[in-house]
Every structure is written in structure tokens, then in C-alpha cells.
Amino acid sequence: MENKSIGILGIGSYVPEKILTNQDLEKIVETTDEWILTRTGIRERRICEKDQATSDIATIAAKRALEDANVKPEEIDCIILATVTPDTLCPATACYVQNNIGAINAAAFDINAACSGFIYGTTIGKSMIIAGIAKKILVIGTETLSKFTNWQDRTTCILFGDGAGAAVIGEVEKGRGFLAEEIKTDGSLTELIIIQAGGSRLPASPETVSNGKHTVAMRGNEVFKVAVKSMTDSLINAINKSGFTKQDIKYVIPHQANIRIIEAIARRLDIPMEKVYVNLDKYGNTSAATIPIALDEAVKEGKIKKGDLIAFVAFGGGLTWGASVLIY
């Protein structure tokens, strides 16, 4: 069974229609378009409507991925949904999506690896298929971070946006598919990116709400240093395990967090920015959704074609990080 080649059968994404520009943020908090752009590379981000939940945007992305893969919902054996902004703590957001798309034969569960969620999800999915537990798996990265953002905190509210991306993975012909992956965690750094309240450690109360404990808090400078090193190391390790070299890779799709992080990784690896796909100027940081959204766009634009060697790399709260190399 280990000889199976597991790859991406179809890809889809969705971003809300509402656009929040840097100029819009100038009216909300003390910041400027120039400051945001030079420090993050973000020009605008997408924001869900009040009645749009994480499962709603995930459902649209999932349907598009199924259509692209030419796979029927009932053929899906499992849905792995990566998010830090679930509809509810119980049940899993994946259960809502399962019902919405009619995947009546699928097991469904959520994973929380923050911005590394899509890499974690595809790694888990690949392992399940190799083990014979499933044949076709829907992996979704989806976030409504605008609902968990402190709009008075100018250091974080400029960063995040909403969106969803999905991939159908399954057996592909020899010479294609996932070649190597690495996923890592350092639980001693949990405080660097955190939503403090709403769980068993700090249950919801009037005090936690008034103190903004249900929104994302981040220590940006400390995150930057860890992100650059961890992502660089993981990408090198995954490339080495794949049997290829960095020169062979057509495109690297990094987590879309900050242009300075992305550029620093490219410099460390001596990879030209022309081979790094970037779209965070349009969508900001959509956490687990950034990589599948970027992949979908790159494929639709014709930049990534069947047979191309590509790599994913991400980091997120936990701290988690990882990379994977595949032939699309």
C-alpha cells in the first residue's frame, strides 16, 4: 500500500465579496495605507457578512473542489477541516459541511493547527489513504477571522481576512502526488499567537468579553523570528526528502502572513521571488485557507500546471509549522 501515489484531484476556493481596504482601516484605527503596505504587503482583505459562518464559505470552496475533481459528494470518505474559527466548539465545523454538500458516506472532523492547518490536513489525509482507511478525502482550510479580530488593536486588525480553500485528494498516477512532508510543533510558544478565552482554561464570561479575550492576540516580532527559521528549515527538509532540489521547484506557495517573512525565507533559500506565489496583497492572512486559496488561483491563472513540482510551507499558532513537496 505504501507504493500508492496520493495527490490532488481537484482544488477550489472562495473569498467573500466584501472588501476592506487599508484606506478603510485608516478610518477605524490609527494607521496608514503606507504603513500597512510597507510592513505587511497587504492592500486589502475580504470580510464575511454577519450571517456568514465558517462552514458557509467552506461549503462553497468544497463544492468547487469536487467539481474540479469531477468527484461526487457521496464518493468522499472523509472530510478534514482545518480552522481556528469554528462555527461551534461542538459539533465540528466539518459536520456542517458534510451535511451541506451531501457527503453522506464521509466521516468528518476538524483539526486546529492554525495557519499550518492545510499542510497538517493533507498529511493526515495522505496517511489515511495509504493505510486503506479512505480512498478520497476532502481537505478544507477555512477561516472567518474577522469575527475573532480586535478592531481596536492596530497591530492585528490590519492582518486578517476571511476565506476558504479546499482540495480533493486521492490516488493519482505514478509520477504525481505528494512526495515528502514535515510537520512540527513547539508547544512552549503557545502564548505567541493565541485566542485566550472561550475554552476550558478561560470559559466565556462578561469579563472575558469586555477584555477582548475572544480575539486573536499576537507578539509579532517574536513570531517573525521563529516563523522565518522554522519555515526555512522545514522546506529544506521536505525538499531533501523528496529527492529533488530547490532548483527543480517551479513554485513555492507559502502561508500568506507577511511579505517580509516570505521575502526573508526566499533570501535564505536563495529562491527568486518569481518562483514564490504571493496573493496576500488581496486577501491578507486567512490562516488555514491561505495555501489552498493561493494554489487555486495559481492553477486558474495557468502558473501551475499538471506535472509541475511545487512546495507548500506554513507556520501558525501552537506554534506549528510544516512543509510539503508534491507534483501537481
Image (cartoon, helix red, strand yellow):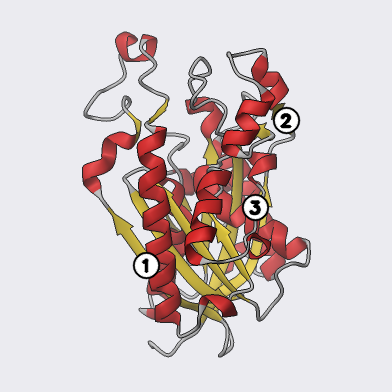
Which residue lies under the disc numbered 3?
Answer: 278
At x 58%, y 60%, the residue is 253
* Marks 1, 3: nearer the viewer: 3
Which residue lies under the disc numbered 2?
Answer: 19
Secondary structure found at label 2: strand
* Separation (CA) of disc 3 from disc 2: 18 Å
At x 42%, y 70%, the residue is 236
Q: Residue 199 appears at what percent x and percent y?
A: 28, 30
Taking the image as shown, residue 141 lies to the left or right of residue 133, namely right
At x 66%, y 81%, the residue is 307
The disc labelled 2 sits on which kind of residue?
A: Ile
**Where on the picture, by quarter, is residue 108?**
bottom left
The disc labelled 1 sits on which kind of residue?
A: Glu
Which residue lies under the disc numbered 1?
Answer: 182
Inspect this view and state whether residue 98 appears: no
Asked whether disc 1 touches disc 3, contact meaning CB atoms under 8 Å apart, the reply is: no
* Separation (CA) of disc 1 from disc 2: 34 Å
Taking the image as shown, residue 25 lies to the left or right of residue 132, namely right
